[in-house]
Amino acid sequence: MKTICSTGFYQMLYLLENKKRNSLPSLLLCGFGLLFLVPFCGCLQPSDEEVIVYTALDAEFSKPILDGYGKKSGLLVRPKFDTEATKTVGLFSAIEREKDRPRCDLFWNNEILHTLRLERLGLLDPYESELAENFPLQYRSPKGNWYGIAARARVYLVNTDLLPENEYPTTIHDLTNEKWKGRGGIAKPLFGTTATHAAVLFDQWGAEKAKTFFTNVKANAKVFAGNKQVAQAVANGQLAFGLTDTDDAIVEIEKGHPVAIVYLDQKKDEMGTLFIPNTLAVIQGAPHREQARKLLDYLLSEEVEQALAAGESAQFPLNKKITVLPRVAENQKKIKQMEVDFYGAANQWDGATAFLKGLFEGG
């Protein structure tokens, strides 16, 4: 019955999608057929042999890992991706929109604040993984609502043909220094890790200081659509330096461009470099909750973080058992990390976003 149902169901969908080439009688017959099949068709019910993942991590990085898990587990892992510039926002909105009838089982976010916003909305399902103790408290929910893995660092990429090493910018405040007017760059701080970075600064400094900073950044630096575009502009000499993520920076380094990474604010009295983790969370009311929990455990494994560290994105493992550093940090002694209250930053999100949207899109 399931095979017949599946065949008939998809044939009818084909007829509907190609309605311009079909007669009205055929379409009416198709509609009545669907009404007949739906009550009896087991194939329209959620299958215990699949798990649906909404992932904001680029497909070239996340898909091989999900495919590998599918082969090991025998599950059909079905990822949903979104567009490059707004993918985290799009997936967050989809999960919020579907809250009464969830479709997503596991949310693999490439940042953290939208995950915390979902937690605040009560849309995450708590799960105490046995692997939780391997991760620092800063990078996991105290209630088991989410877990952080595989972080990226917010860094400057510097064009070494345009700047000698003794003139490299070293602090976030160099984006507002008139010495660098028109020579530094930043992604529009409305999406992705740049928006997360902005919310963190609003929390660290307070709203007024952060507003002054970003007003000066807009006046002093060039603004690009995303972090990738910033890194490319540095690589081709359009910028002397730009604020980006380590995964975008390593791409330009390994293409052979004259560029180098600078970790920000490393002096004793400075705040350090911001690390932004990927986050994993099971969705409240997930159709395949147990399958999602098993996949989450797999993604928390040393195997996965080592793969992400060794892969093209060169991400920083957060699992305390892993000592290997990614290629983006091979020549670093010790990187001073910013101490962050991510919950405080999430609380700043709405106010920061409203201000920054007016500043960067208001003309």
Image (cartoon, rainbow, N blue to C red):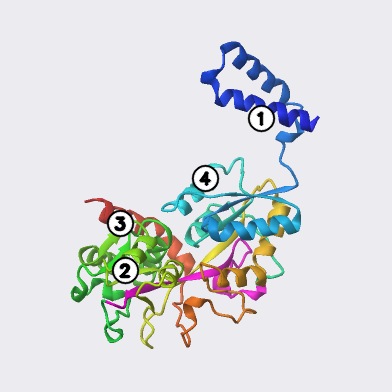
Q: Is residue 250 left or right of residue 282?
A: left
Q: CA distance from mark 2 to mark 3?
A: 27 Å
Dot 4 amino acid type: Ala
- Name the quarter where the N terminus is drawn: top right
Q: Which residue is label 1 attached to? A: 10
- Residue 42 in the image: state x and y as whole percent: 76, 33
Distance (Cα) linking label 4 and label 1? 25 Å
Give me the residue at 44% from left, 77% from top: 338
**Which region shows up in magenta?**
133-161
Please provide percent x and percent y for residue 120. 52, 56
Q: Residue furthest right?
A: 1
Q: Which mark is residue 234?
A: 2
* CA gap, disc 1 and disc 2: 49 Å
Q: Quadrant of residue 227?
A: bottom left
Label 3 vs label 1, nearer the camera: 1
* Three-letter amino acid code at the position of disc 3: Phe
Query: Of the residues shown, which amino acid type is indicated by label 2?
Result: Val
Tell me the element at label 2.
helix
Which one is closest to the eye, mark 4 or mark 3?
Answer: 4
* Circle number at residue 94: 4
Mark earlier in primary sequence (2, 3): 2
> Which mark is on residue 355?
3
Relative to 263, 81 lies left or right: right
The image position of residue 92, as x and y in percent, is 50, 50
The residue located at (37%, 72%) in the rendering is 257
User: Is label 1 in a helix, a strand or a loop?
Assistant: helix
Q: Quadrant of residue 359?
A: bottom left
Mark-to-mark CA distance, 4 and 3: 24 Å
